[in-house]
Amino acid sequence: MNLFEYQGKELLRRFEVPVPEGRVAKSPDEARDAARHLGGKVVVKAQVQVGARGKQGGVELVASPDEAAAAAERILEVEFMEQNAFALVQRRRRGEVLSAEEEERIAKATPIKASRVLVERAGDIADEYYCAFLVDRSDRAFLGMMSAQGGMDIEKVAEDDPAAIARVHIDPLLGISDFHARRLVFGARINPDAVKGAVAIIPKLYRAFVEMDASQIEINPLVLTGDGKVVALDAKVTLDDSAAFRHPIFDELKAAHEVPEQERLAKEKGLNFIKLEGNIGVIGNGAGLVMSTLDVVNAAGGEPANFLDVGGGASADILSAGLEVITSNPEVTSVLVNIFGGITRCDLVAEGILDALGRLEVEVPLVVRLDGTNAEQGRKMLADAPHPMLKTADTMLGAAELAVKLSRAGG
Amino acid sequence: MAILIDDTTRLVVQGLTGREGSFHAKRNRDYGTNLVAGVTPGKGGGDVDGTPVFDTVAEAVAETAANTSMVFVPARFAADAVLEAHDAGCDTIICITENIPAMDMARTVSHIRHSRRGVLIGPNCPGVISPGKANVGIIPGEICEPGPIGLVSRSGTLVYQIVNELTQKGLGQSTCVGIGGDPIPGSDFIDVLEKFEADDQTEVVVLVGEIGGDAEERAAAWAQENMTKPVVAYIAGRTAPPGKRMGHAGAIVSGSKGTAAAKTDALEAAGIRVGKNPTEVAEIVAEIRG
């Protein structure tokens, strides 16, 4: 779960990491009140998870409560785009001619609106840094990173000037020691005035990272203020959903995130569902097989409408629910069910498909490929109950090609 | 010879009395795996279909000389179960459980690596099968055949899909290893490639990767330096959108990192042929075998 900035900062505050004083507002009036309470100049920031938030009009510096209200009104209306699509828009604005495919990607990008703004007291910034902790998969350890090039896209810094990022691995069993913090701070060669404050913050960030079961905490920028304090001006915190059982607060944090209707429905049924942009519904068992199925649908010239993993040992009910979720998307013009039974039994899959066909008005072709545990039994059950929309295929590639072909014929 | 498990395997199942644990342990035993014990705290002294159950792994090892553990306990207790098996001296631990917090695995994997003893496969994996010898986990035994192909995969169902394609082409397997889809696996591709390189039964290795992380890139570099046996690869998730976690906790393209294209490039640059789909992988293996 990726937290909103204000949520990340609330967590960091519990670990005594200095963050600017601020208040969350859901309306211009609330933003006005927040600015009045804080006094003086404030920054109004969209609480939305997109890159280049500032460039998209999501951050404004204002001098009075009325200006804060006006800024909040504007910001809450902004239709943000995910970073890749926005990068294309920027290229177009610079006068570049985009390809038809790129134009289509912009047109297809789902607009994202902020439902909250964070109103924060604005201060003077003397210098900006980058600091992060994450689970490093390569070394199977924790990785701390710091750079004097704050406020920039850190991936770009890593590419252009890798030496500008200090890195230190921390053994999860040993935990952080002061020398780790010194290595980061001196390694990044930050302003000497910020050294003491940064060395003090780093172990606190580490504690927040470990104790909150975060998979990543990124502070960009960490700033040195005009009066010599080191403060986390932004916070990107990603929590490990698998650890929710020992953090009751995870549910509370999650409640602030709006989940699209289809994804919410899928989650309720215990399905692993991700909406995509195309029109061929895909169901499979196991994340790897479903990813692979999306690839072969693509290679066959189709565009998948979703990723849906029914998991291991899926019952007839789960399969049926999965089909319901997929066919509730009006964009879908055919559905591909690709099952390789291990724990999952193909006879139960067939039962689920037949249940869905009986229960729902399925008006798009359904291509089914069954293999593995009890596959023959499952295939026979489908053959014995013919339905005009039900087609079967023997192989994964054959099934993908058929689903793409039927999708075109119908659409 | 095969790797990790064979006919010398003496298996203890942690969580044997659970619904999933008993179902799969029984299938493993029916396959011919030497299932010697189960462990469920508080249920020691009983048995499951004749397999004795103990309260602790230490007791199970002392009484039955178990040398391999399969962990089938719920996620919140699973890291503890792995540590218990390691402490009791089980040198091969296969953890099927998914959704274990990454912090728990980070500590557990660090401890096992520091000890310089034992191998952890998983978590969030389908287990290991050495066809004709032993099956520990949930890979369906009936689609496998003994033979010279080693297979290592992050995805479970892609093990089934690709093994099935191999078997249909008459290409049997030495051992199939599911290393799991988590960000911090107990063993990575390199750990398993190293074993296949040293195994006299294995002649060709199939590596099945997916988006996220850089395990495939590191495996490619390692294989180029250290492997004499041919490796054929497959990467799932070519068309996965960035920033979306595709089912597995570890399967996510962040920014420009972890893409299937970058992995394919790294593998091909190391002289490893990459199949565009599971069927093509089996075709390439068949071609190499002549």
Image: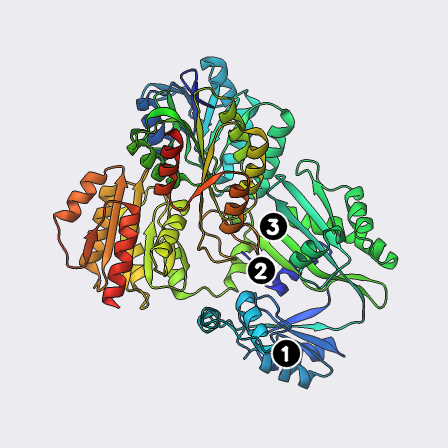
Q: CA distance from mark 3 to mark 1?
A: 30 Å
**Are labels 3 and 2 on one chain?**
yes
Label at residue A214: 3
Q: Is A395 left or right of B287, judged from the image as shown? A: left
In the picture of the structure, the residue carrying the numbered disc 1 is A31
Residue at figure coordinates x 12%, y 47% from the top left: A384
Badge nearest the viewer, 3 or 1: 3
Residue A17 location in percent, x, y?
A: 73, 57
Residue type pointed to by label 2: Leu
In the picture of the structure, the residue carrying the numbered disc 2 is A3
Mark 3 or 2, nearer chain start: 2
Q: Toward the viewer: B76 or B152?
A: B152
The local secondary structure at tag 3 comes to strand
Residue at figure coordinates x 60%, y 38% from the top left: B106
Residue at figure coordinates x 58%, y 29% from the top left: B226
Q: Is B200 left or right of B283, judged from the image as shown? A: right
Q: Is A325 left or right of A89, judged from the image as shown? A: left
Assess disc 1: are there few (<14), some (14-19) or many (≥20) residues with their C-alpha within 10 Å of its C-alpha: many
